[in-house]
Amino acid sequence: MLYVSLIPHFGQIGNVAFVVLCVFMTYGVIIGGFGTYHLINTWSRDRRVIQRGEVVAYLDSGNGFTHLSAKHEAAKIPRMLPAPKDETFPPDERDIIQMYNDGQVTLETIADTLGLKYHRVQSIVAQAKKAGLINRK
């Protein structure tokens, strides 16, 4: 019964089916074109690759060769960073206490020498005095 009720709409159903078919065919042609383009580029690239055993080279456009195996092996070697120049470490509290215990420098001289603020050096020495680490007379 359902089939009979669709008879008057066969023309519309046919038009919709035709549009869907045209859309699928258009996309098929587009995808086929891109596939062909990709295939041609792959063949062109592979034509320039030379492989003998584990050695692979590529023929450049300037008729020179690029040794791809060497580049691959070079990528495995980590590059060393240059050593830092004139690296300075921040002064340790023990250094400040030792300089003060030597008895030849003042807190101001220690602060100027180490590039610290006077208050910071003063507080470190005060804490060391409380802890009994200062032997200065």
Image: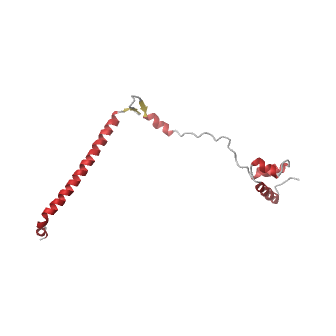
From what the image shows, is residue 9 above or below residue 87?
A: below
Q: Residue furthest bottom?
A: 1
Above or below 103: residue 78: above
Q: Position of residue 55 (x, y in %)?
A: 41, 32
Count the numbered circles shown.
0
Comparing 69 with 83, the one in front is 83
- x and y percentages locating residue 59 in the rendered image: 38, 31
Name the foreground residue: 48 vs 108: 108
Q: Is residue 107 left or right of residue 10?
A: right
Toward the top, the furthest residue is: 63
> Residue sitting at 32 percent across and 36 percent down?
44
User: Which residue is depicted at the point 21% across and 57% down?
Assistant: 20
Quadrant assignment for the N terminus: bottom left
Q: Position of residue 51 (x, y in %)?
A: 38, 32
Colouring rule applied to residues: secondary structure
Q: In the rendered view, does 126 fall on the left or right side of 90?
A: right
Q: Residue at 27% of width from left, 42% of height from top?
A: 36
Q: Position of residue 25 (x, y in %)?
A: 22, 51
The residue sitting at 14% across, 65% down in the picture is: 9
